[in-house]
Image: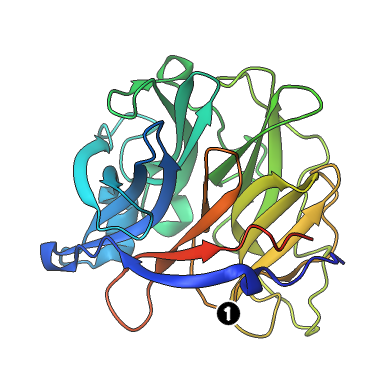
Amino acid sequence: MTTAPPFYKRLTPQGRILDLSEEHHIVWSCSPIRDADGLVHVFFTRVPMGEDGWFKNFRTHGHIMHAVAKQPEGPYTVKALVLAGRGEGFWDAFGIVNPRIYRVEDQYALLYTAYEVPWPQHQMKEHIGILLSEDLQTWRRGNDGKPILSPSEDPKAWDHQLVNNASLVKDPDTGGYRLYYRGIQTLENTRDRIGVAMANQLEGPWRKYENNPLIDPDNLLSPTGVAYRGFEDPCVWIEGGKYCMLTKDLGYFDSPGSAYFESVDGLDWGIPVRGYGNPEDSPQLLFDAGGNLTHLFVNRHREGPLTGFVYQIDSGKTG
């Protein structure tokens, strides 16, 4: 078990961001980054409410938006639509969701989840794609417009139906890249597992690790002794010479919230501790120019509209 203090002790709430409820939209998956001038750019999923509600529309009409603020807690100005589904017949036909923004060498990489088949639920099919930019304004499709990671063809594979929620890390030992992701074998008997793929180049080819999944509810007994679904929304970074991961907890602990893992090699993650204590999804991190953690961005979907929410992080309290 990690000897680090609970992650929540590093957090100070700053408040909601990007309330679009008056426009009949919900906000999900806020991924932040600072530019060279110190402005904070947030890439987020915007979903129309519609007659069917946001939950189904997330998969059919979700799209990625770009907003900018002078400080992490806002206020934010929504600047542009970044990407929407291309329509039936494409691998990214419908909902375009879960953006993850990174600075990689001399360009920006925006990873996202795309629905090829959004509904009915047992037929869903998702892939992970990549956009590239030099200025956070003009984007082009990476990997010749193809997904960088797709579900495994083997029906018995742990990630046969869905791959999503990508988290990118540069491997300090090899100089290559790692992409941590959530996979599901089938939504008829949902188990949420986390694995990793590796590549020498940002656009791939990406190779799934032969010993996936790394985190599996079938092999990680809950302290409550009760069966649980697993973990989703992995957010991985390197801090204090170790790999760290925040995930949404789907029942490992006895109350809703997140789990925090640590690893020496990014492959063996051991036993988690509580990350933060609220049932908030899609944890994403903001760093300063020196690479230090400054803020945590999550979804706030309790006691009000569905928006982003920001916590300040005390970067001095590392494990």
Residue at image mark 1: 256
Name the amino acid, label 1: Pro
113, 315: nearer the viewer: 315
Residue 156 placed where, x, y %? 71, 46
- In this view, the residue in front, 113 or 116, is 113
Residue drawn at (20%, 49%), measured in percent from left and top? Answer: 77
- Residue at 64%, 25% (x, y): give it: 206
Q: In x, y percent, where is residue 59? A: 34, 52
Q: Judge the density around disc 1: few (<14), some (14-19), many (≥20) Cα neighbours within 10 Å.
A: some
**Measured from the top left, where is residue 190 in percent x and y?**
60, 63
Residue at the spot 85% in from the left edge and 67% down from the top edge:
3
Vertical relation: 121 (above or below) 159:
below
Residue 158 appears in the figure = no
* Location of the C terminus (image quadrant): bottom right
* Depth check, front residue: 88 or 309: 309
Question: Which residue is depicted at the point 54% across and 59% down?
Answer: 187
Residue 88 x %, y %: 27, 34
- Tell me if 61 is positioned left or right of 15 in this view: left
Quadrant housing residue 132: top left
Can residue 303 be spotted in the picture?
A: yes
